[in-house]
Amino acid sequence: MLKTSIIRIAAALTGALLLAGCSAGFEDPVRNGGPVSFQAGSLLLRDDATKADIKEGNSFDSGDAFSVFGMRNSGSTQSLVFDDVTVTNDSGTWKYSPTRSWSWSSTTDYYDFVAVYPSGNSARMDISGDLAVSTDFDLSTDNYDLLTATYRRKGSVQSPNAIVDLAFSHVTSAVKVVVINNSESTAVSVDAVSFKNLMVVGAAKSTLDLYGNGLNSWINLERSSATVRESNYGSSVAAGSRYECAYDFMIPQQLDQAVGSGSDEANMPRLLLTYTPEGGSQSTADIC
């Protein structure tokens, strides 16, 4: 008689903060300063965040780049200083060109910054008032670790011309499917993994409130019943062992919300796992 494998499924959601160091020095805040410069580092992520496509470790890699947006606020006047400027890690030193300089006319002046990693995917939102940046994310085309950082530099601080230390945070969800073969004797092939009934389109919005605190949110969200993030594996999982699929980057969302109206479980986010027990026929598990 054919023995079948029992498959347990788990999804790991990974989030973390990437923090930076500090710098010292003193400049008169009412005197024009030196160049505006940046630095950024990172803390280790959770133990299960081990894939190369997730930003982890204690620093960014040489060649990594983020986009920076910056607004100078002086009285009732706002001046755009950085508009999607690429800042690149050159062996530990963050560089951009041409260089901008600090300009202080009063201790009440302040600069707001929004940075997005990776570079080249974001745009400043055409709204009055606070600096806001959006990054479109479409599951049909985008599958990367999206991080943002915000920072306010006040002219009243002791070192207004010091390096801007950016603290990045993850704004997408990193999802990893783990297949555990509980059979004592039968191997199973993990053939493919996909998802459906997800938020598939949206934009990550990053801005600052009146007090300079960063605000991250998702806007312009669209949910679809289409199958997305289909990955083919064809990997054999021996009896009693486990297999970890690659990470997929998703738009954060509630898993108990259905496509359309109502609360029909069939229309809630679902995981599709296609597998073949050794000596058996291929099957697809449709998991809410």
Image (cartoon, helix red, strand yellow):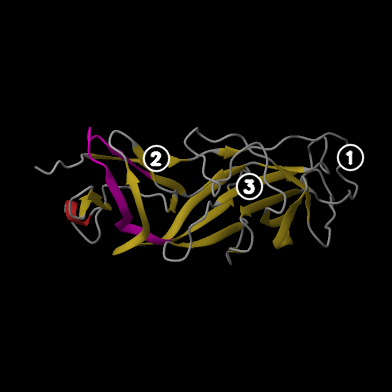
Name the kind of residue labelled 1 in the image.
Answer: Glu
Q: Nearer the viewer, residue 68 or 272?
A: 272
State the mark number for residue 12: 2
Looking at numbered disc 2 in the image, what kind of residue is underneath it? Ala
Residue 225 in percent (x, y) is at 27, 63
Which residue in the structure is indicated by mark 3? 150
Which residue is denoted by mark 1 in the rendering?
A: 27
Estimate the spatial distance between the alpha carbons at disc 3 and disc 2, rounded to whole Å.
27 Å
Image point 34% across, 37% down: which residue? Answer: 242
Say which residue appears at 78% left-offset and 58% top-offset. Answer: 96
Instruction: Name the mark nearer the viewer: 3 or 2.
Output: 2
Most prominent secondary structure in the magenta stretch? Answer: strand
For the magenta stretch, what is the residue range? 177-201
C-alpha span from label 1 to label 3: 23 Å
Which picture quadrant has residue 17? top right
Residue 5 in percent (x, y) is at: 20, 41
Can residue 263 be spotted in the picture? no
